[in-house]
Amino acid sequence: MQELLTLAIFLFWLALSLDRQRRWPKTCFLSAVEEGPRPAALGATVLAVVPARNEAEVIPRTLPRLLAQQPDLAGVVLVDDRSSDGTSALARSLAEELKASRRLWVVSPPPPPPGWSGKVHALAAGLEECRRIHPPAGPEWLLFTDADIEHAGSSVRALLAQAEKGPYDLVSVMARLHAGSFWERLLIPPFVFFFQLIYPFRAISRPGAKVSAAAGGCILARREKLEAAGGLATIRGAFIDDVALSKAVRAAGGRLWLGLDAGIASIRPYRSLRELWAMISRCAFHQLRCRWDLLAAVLLGLAVFFVSPPLLAGAALLRGGWPAAAFALGAWILQSLALYPYVRHHRVPALFCWTLPLAALLYALMTFTSAWNRWSRKGAAWKGRSY
């Protein structure tokens, strides 16, 4: 029985390693572009909208890099979402130091009305400001980027070039996440790995694809197509707003592209397991559409195919069951090889390729926590707001 189980697990990982759609998306990286004078083909107007709630810790690094993206970026609208740490004053001060005050607009919207999530409401307020800045309808392109995202010197140009290449109506980049602490190194590469399993990057860009996704930290959207999709009001209550936005744009006939770029990185640190637990459990059950059958399937799948290989290998070796041990070790090796590109991308020591079983166990527990919070009506909290 153990041999059949370990064989099934090994075959699962073998099939996954041969699945071109779910391999490391090495072809889904932004192409390098040259800095300097802007090519005539990329003459579209781009305005950035940055939702910011208590971001004084990160904007001294991220906002100057964004404001420096001239002439590709016409300006930045920073939406101060009721911060209590002086975010808006600091942003204005940074712009003055850079002599870029005319390219920064800071708006402070009222609290979100009922039925609106905080971030989507902030983005909508930023979009309204963009229409005021660039009448009558607004700029051709909108860059929705989080306050903790640090952009390389030519990232806006690279995003726009990718959009024109498709042509695509929504181009998104999964930022390289901060992975300095032990818990970040353990959990961040698997986070992107699991995301790619659910939303294969290669599939998203294909015409007529059924799967839709985006990474909310960095989204370049064609304004005309966004409005054809019903605007941000159509996703006003979405808990996972980036995926909801991508689905709305695709439903309106838009084309999507999702990829990676080492020069677009999140500098937000997660200093403890508790912080990572709160971030992931906040929306894990919503990712499963709050379905208990999917929760049971995911927990079982994580336990059998991700957590068990080293445990089964050890048990088989103790019993002298060499075939079962070989299959289990083979599965563990295959999953480690599958994780390796994600570990390397996040500049994490290669040793963490072997810790996917432990990471999967923690993700199972965090997903269960998310479901428990939903069932107990405890909800989730993020940046001082309860959902």
Image (spheres, rainbow, N blue to C red):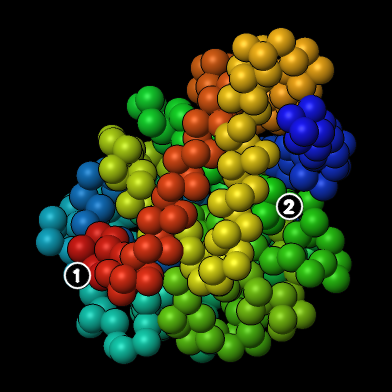
Which residue is nearer to you in this view: 201 or 158?
201
Q: Quadrant of residue 355?
A: top right
Residue that mark 2 sits on: 200
The residue sitting at 56% across, 31% down in the picture is: 357
Q: Amino acid at mark 2?
A: Pro
Q: How far across and how far down the image is residue 10, in percent?
A: 79, 31
Question: Earlier along the polypeptide chain: callout 1 or callout 2?
Answer: 1
Picture layout, residue 165 above or below residue 14: below
Report if residue 22 is visible in the image: yes
> Which quadrant is home to the N terminus?
top right
Picture layout, residue 108 above or below residue 143: below
Q: Amino acid at mark 1?
A: Arg
SS under mark 1:
loop
Residue that mark 1 sits on: 82
> Left or right: where does residue 86 sit relative to residue 170?
left
> Which quadrant is home to the C terminus?
bottom left
The residue sitting at 61% across, 64% down in the picture is: 294
